[in-house]
Image (cartoon, rainbow, N blue to C red):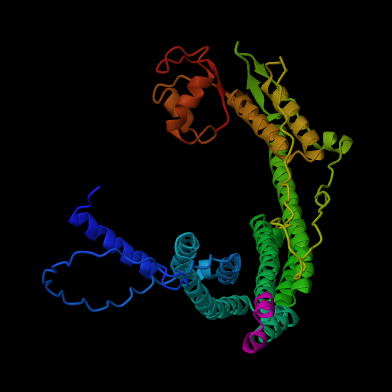
């Protein structure tokens, strides 16, 4: 087979390549067949490209370290520390912003731990600054509250009423200031609370004790006033004098800042004032009742000596009556000392060191009340004088039982019946006379000196004789007219 020239060229090239590849081999290469000369075409030289620098390797990206729980706890602890000292109370706006930053820093830890750590570090820094700021504000607040409490104590003169207790509040204040100076926060805050509590407790208890003594003083003055209204200077002068003297002793003890002594003395003064008021009231009502009883008795006795005219025109002769006979059988009872048992609770001042309730402890006095007894008039007799005597006797019985109001009612009713009896009473009689001049008429009869000595009282004669006088202008000689009392 005849090999073409191009084929021989290709085989020659391959032989060269093989020779180059195994040039290190000791074997002798086979002789190459002769080749026809190759006419090489001129080849344009291609400029060599400069060697390029190697590309830099990409930097190693390190994974950021995750946010540690210790970082979160440290920030929370700083915020909590500021809150415990009262940052939320003194600076609520700043404290809320601090909380927002804390929450944002914690949330940022999921995506950017490094930024989260920076944020939490700022939170700690701001929390510590807020802590210091609150500490200063808290101290100023304590000092202001202490000053107000001290002023309030001085207003009620605690330094005089309770000097030892007041001095103790000042000592506590000095101890608090010393703890603040050394920076012992926990101890200073506790001591400040103790100081303010001691002030508040002293002020409340002392104020209540002063108020209690004031109530005793007011009650005593009111009862003394009641005694004077009941004319105790007449009916109970000794009791009134004793109450006044004891009252002034109680006032003197109070002015000397002796609260326990003032309370004890003022309690006794109140008891004596109640005694004076009740004694004066009883004696005054007894005196008024006895006066009304005596007056009613006198009127009944006088009325019993009068003749009376019945409805049918009959004249009843007088029936004299003496009330002393009844009083001898029913002697009057003296109620001047019957004032009942007067009990006033012993003073119980509050302990200045102990919490107390709101009961003021002031005894309440119950006023004396009489029984409300109704009067039943069951008499059927039409003799008004008998009615009057019966009511008077009931009044005496009620008076002896100490029911003065009821007794006075009986006596007033008896006087009303006496009025009716006296309206029917006959003072004398007069026989009508005919004269040529100045013949008798009711006007002239009333004008007579021995009758009324007043002609304008003629209607009394007419009313007493209406049974026989139909027309007051017509009377007849020989008529016997009844002349009522003037």
437 or 44: which is nearer to us? 44
- Where, quadrant-wise, is the C terminus in this rendering? top right
- From where the camera sits, is residue 44 visible? yes
Q: Magenta part of the protein: which range? A: 178-191
76 or 237: which is nearer to us? 76
Please tell me whether residue 42 is drawn above or below residue 237 in the rendered image.
Answer: below
Any magenta on residue 184?
Answer: yes
Please name the residue shown 78% across and 72% down the image.
260
Residue 181 spot, x, y in % from top left: 63, 89
Q: Picture quarter containing residue 141?
A: bottom right
Question: Is residue 184 rendered to the left or right of residue 100?
Answer: right
220 or 473: which is nearer to us? 220
Residue lying at the far right of the rendered structure: 329
Any magenta on residue 451?
Answer: no
Please tell me whether residue 287 is drawn above or below residue 460 in the rendered image.
Answer: below
Q: Picture quarter containing residue 6?
A: bottom left
Question: Is residue 170 rendered to the left or right of residue 119?
Answer: right
Residue 188 spot, x, y in % from top left: 66, 80
Please name the residue shown 39% across and 24% down the image.
437
Residue 421 spot, x, y in % from top left: 63, 25
430 or 225: which is nearer to us? 225
Please tell me whether residue 268 is drawn above or below residue 284 in the rendered image.
Answer: below
Q: Picture quarter containing residue 368?
A: top right
| Number of numbered discs visible in the structure rendering | 0
Please name the residue shown 67% across and 54% down the image.
230
């Amino acid at each position: 087979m005849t090999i073409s020239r191009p084929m021989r060229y290709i085989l020659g090239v391959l032989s060269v390549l093989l020779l180059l590849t195994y040039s290190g081999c000791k074997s002798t290469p086979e002789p190459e067949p002769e080749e026809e000369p190759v006419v090489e075409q001129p080849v344009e030289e291609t400029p060599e490209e400069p060697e390029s620098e190697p590309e830099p390797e990409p930097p190693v990206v390190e994974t950021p370290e995750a946010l540690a729980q210790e970082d979160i706890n440290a920030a929370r602890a700083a915020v909590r520390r500021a809150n415990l000292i009262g940052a939320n109370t003194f600076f609520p706006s700043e404290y809320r912003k601090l909380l927002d930053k804390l929450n944002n820093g914690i949330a940022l830890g999921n995506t950017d731990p490094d930024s989260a750590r920076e944020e939490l570090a700022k939170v700690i820094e701001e929390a510590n600054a807020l802590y210091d700021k609150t500490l200063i504000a808290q101290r100023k607040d304590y000092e202001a509250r202490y000053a107000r409490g001290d002023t309030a104590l001085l207003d009620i003169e605690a330094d005089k009423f309770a000097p030892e207790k007041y001095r103790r509040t000042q000592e506590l204040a000095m101890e608090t200031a010393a703890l603040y100076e050394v920076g012992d926060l926990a101890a200073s805050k506790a001591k400040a609370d103790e100081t303010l509590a001691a002030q508040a407790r002293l002020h409340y208890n002392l104020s209540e004790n002063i108020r209690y003594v004031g109530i005793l003083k007011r009650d005593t003055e009111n009862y003394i006033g009641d005694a004077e209204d009941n004319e105790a200077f007449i009916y109970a002068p000794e009791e009134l004098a004793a109450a006044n003297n004891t009252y002034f002793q109680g006032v003197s003890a109070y002015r000397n800042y002796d609260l326990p002594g003032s309370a004890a003395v003022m309690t006794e003064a109140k008891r004596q004032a109640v005694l004076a008021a009740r004694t004066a009231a009883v004696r005054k009502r007894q005196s008024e009742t006895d006066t009304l009883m005596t007056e009613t008795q006198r009127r009944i006795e006088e009325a019993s000596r009068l003749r009376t005219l019945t409805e049918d025109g009959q004249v009843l002769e007088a029936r004299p009556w003496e009330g002393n006979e009844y009083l001898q059988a029913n002697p009057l009872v003296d109620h001047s000392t019957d004032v009942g048992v007067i009990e006033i609770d012993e003073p119980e001042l509050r302990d200045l060191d102990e919490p107390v309730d709101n009961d003021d402890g002031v005894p309440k006095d119950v006023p004396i009340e009489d029984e409300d007894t109704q009067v039943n008039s069951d008499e059927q007799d039409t003799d008004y004088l008998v009615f009057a005597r019966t009511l008077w006797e009931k009044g005496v019985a009620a008076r002896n039982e100490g029911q003065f109001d009821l007794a006075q009612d009986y006596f007033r009713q008896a006087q009303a019946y006496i009025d009716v009896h006296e309206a029917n009473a006959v003072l004398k009689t007069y026989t009508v006379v005919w004269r040529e001049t100045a013949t008798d008429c009711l006007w002239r009869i009333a004008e007579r000196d021995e009758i009324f000595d007043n002609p304008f009282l003629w209607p009394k004669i007419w009313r007493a004789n209406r049974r026989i006088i139909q027309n007051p202008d017509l009377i007849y000689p020989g008529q016997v007219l009844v002349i009522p009392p003037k």
